[in-house]
Amino acid sequence: MRAMWSGSLTFGLVNIPVKLYSATEEQTPRFDFLHEKDLSPIRYAKFCRGEGEEVKDEEIVKGFEYKKGEYVVMSDEDFQRVSPERTRAIEIVSFAAEDEIDSRYFEKPYYLEPDRGADKAYALLREALRRSGKVGIAKYVLRNRERLAAIKPEGEALTLNQLRFDAEVRKPEGLKLPPAEQAAEREVELALMLVKQLSEPFRPEQYRDEYSEQLMEIIEQKAEGRVLAPVAEAPEPEKVIDIMAALKASLEEVEAKAS
């Protein structure tokens, strides 16, 4: 893996030089846009609206529109002027129980690796978090944006889970949501029985991206010049009219599979 950032992880006066790595990778097949006539790749050009001409990357700058049609141009130095030390540090500002963090706030996971000479301090923080059962709530700057994160141990590694700020999470206000009274008690009891029957420990390795796998099979078949099966129509989802009957049938199906 290639580090995407390096700097320091701090809590209190403890300073831990670290490197940041993405903990995920895209598995979905990547497609290019082609010209149907000769299958040449499509190139996306950047045009200046004022001149109607293509602009080279080195001639493009970042600007903020503070009035309609009026911009303030920002250079790399301008971004560094905003608390320059924060672009080189991940600062743990508090500690909290992980179950206090709403799942809507989790955005993207990363791994933290100790840099040269930081093994002891890294292990110290990892063990303190493990024994306390807490996660470190941190702030840092990445790609010209301040980020929020939860830092926790995963095995021997410290992971940094990037969080969304509260202002970025939409509240469900305005949605037409049914009250709890609409669920009859007997229906809830049957639903709980079904939940119990289908409950098992979460093992992420047992879940696969089957859509992408089937997509790759089709790509391989086309590359080999094989004749593809006719396209099957997607079935229309059945409308549930009798919830009790649907729950009972679901329970019977699960019990039959189990036996």
Image (cartoon, rainbow, N blue to C red):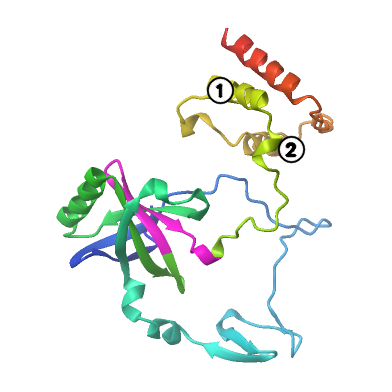
Identify the residue at horizontal 46%, vertical 74% (top origin). Answer: 144
Find residue 258 and report its horizontal and vertical position in percent.
Answer: 57, 11
Q: Which mark is residue 222?
A: 2
The answer to whether marks 1 and 2 mark residues whose Cβ atoms lie closer than 8 Å is: no
Q: Residue 108 carries which label?
A: none
Identify the residue at horizontal 67%, vertical 52% (top origin). Answer: 31
Dot 2 lies on which element? helix
- Frontmost residue, 64 versus 116: 64
Placement of 105 over or under 157, stated as above or below = below
Find residue 25 and report its horizontal and vertical position in percent.
Answer: 49, 49
- Neighbours of disc 1 within 10 Å: few (<14), some (14-19), many (20+): few
The amino acid pointed to by label 2 is Lys
- Frontmost residue, 133 versus 115: 133
- Frontmost residue, 99 versus 182: 182
Is residue 166 within the magenta segment? yes
User: What residue span does the magenta drawing correspond to?
Assistant: 148-167
Placement of 52 over or under 112, stated as above or below = below
Placement of 245 over or under 125, stated as above or below = above
Is residue 48 within the magenta segment? no
Which of label 1 and label 2 is nearer to you?
A: 1
Dot 1 lies on which element? helix
Of labels 1 and 2, earlier in sequence is 1
Find residue 44 and report its horizontal and vertical position in percent.
Answer: 70, 69
Placement of 198 over or under 61, stated as above or below = above
108 sits left or right of 46 in the view: left
Q: Mark 1 points at which residue?
A: 198
The amino acid pointed to by label 1 is Leu
Residue at the far top in the pictured view: 259
